[in-house]
Image: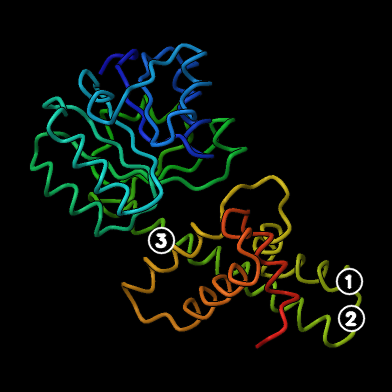
Amino acid sequence: MEQNEKIAFLGLGSMGTPMARRLLAAGHPLTVWNRTAARAAPLAAEGARAAGGPADAVRDADVVITMLTGPDALAEVADAVLPALPAGAHWVEMSTVGPDAVHALAARLDGRARLVDAPVMGSTDRAAEGRLGILAGGDSTGVERVLSHLGTVTRTGPCGTGAALKLVLNTAAIGGVALVAEALRLADALGLDADTARGALAAGPLAGAVARAFSADARFTTALAVKDLALATARAELPVVRAASDAYRRAAEDDPALAAADLSRAAARIRTRIPA
C-alpha cells in the first residue's frame, strides 16, 4: 500500500482527534466524521475533509479507522458504512469494544474489506505524540505504515485478539486504580499521613496504578471505565472487578459530573465516599 493512502477517520473524541491529526500531519488525504459535527471543524481547518456522514466519509477510502465509544456505536456506524465501503479497503477498528463486537463486524464484512482490530493503550498525551501501544489482531501488514504514525504495533494473533487483550489490560488498570483508592481510604481510617501512605504504595507492586490514580494528564472517563469493566464481566466471573465497577458507578451517582471526568477524579471520590 502506498504511503499516501486515503484515510477515513470516524470518531473524534479525546483520543480520536489527536490520532487523526497525526495522520493528517503525515501527509495522508484525510476525511473525518463525528456524530457531533463541530468536533470535525478544527481538523477541517487544518486540511481534512469533513464528511456529512459515515457513508460519505468512506466512499473513496483505502483505510477506514473507527475510534468510537463502544459496541453499540460501532454497530450503528457499520450500518451506515457497509453500503458505501469500497471492496478491498482496510478497516482498522481501534475502539475498545471487546472481541464479540469485532467478530460480529468481521461476519458482516464477509471478506469484502480486510479487518484489523487494533485498540490502543495510552492516553491523550501519547496519542498526540504518536506513542500509543497498538494491539493488533488479524493481518495488519497492509496498514502498519499507517499505524506507525500513531504508535508501536504489537501483533496479538487472529482478528479479535487485540480487542481481547485490551479488555484484559484495561480491567487490570482500572481495577488497580480502585484498589489504590480503597487502600488509601484504609490509610486514612488508620490515621496514617496521606503522603507517606501514597509514597509507600508507589514504591510497591501497585506503582503503576498509584501513578494512574493521581494522573493530571490522562483523559479516560469514568463512563468509559464502567463500559470496559462491563464488557469484561460479561465474559467471565470476576467478582473483584465487578466490585470495582460498582464502586465507580456509585461514585458517578454521588457526583454525576464524574461520569465525564477522568478516572482519577472518580478514584478520589471512592477514597472519600461514606458507605450508604
Image coordinates of residue 163 in percent, x first then y, are 34, 54
Q: Is residue 227 left or right of residue 127?
A: left
In which image quadrant can residue 129 be found? top right
- Colour scheme of the rendered structure: rainbow
Q: Amino acid at mark 1?
A: Thr
Q: Residues within 10 Å of mark 1 (few under 14, many from 20)?
A: few
Residue that label 3 marks: 167
* Sequence-first tag of 1 and 3: 3
Using residue 35 as the reference point, say whether residue 63 is left or right of it.
Answer: left
Quadrant occupied by the N terminus: top left
The residue indicated by pointer 2 is 192
Residue at left 41%, top 56%?
A: 166
The amino acid beneath tag 2 is Leu
Task: Check whether the beta carbons of the residues at disc 2 and disc 1 lie within 8 A of each other.
Answer: yes
Of the numbered discs 3 and 2, the one sitting upstream in the chain is: 3
Q: Nearer the viewer, residue 264 or 77?
A: 77
Disc assigned to residue 196: 1
- At 50% across and 81% down in the image, what residue appears? 240
Separation of residues labelled 1 and 3 (CA atoms): 32 Å
Element under disc 3: helix
Instruction: Tell me: residue 65, above or below residue 158.
Output: above
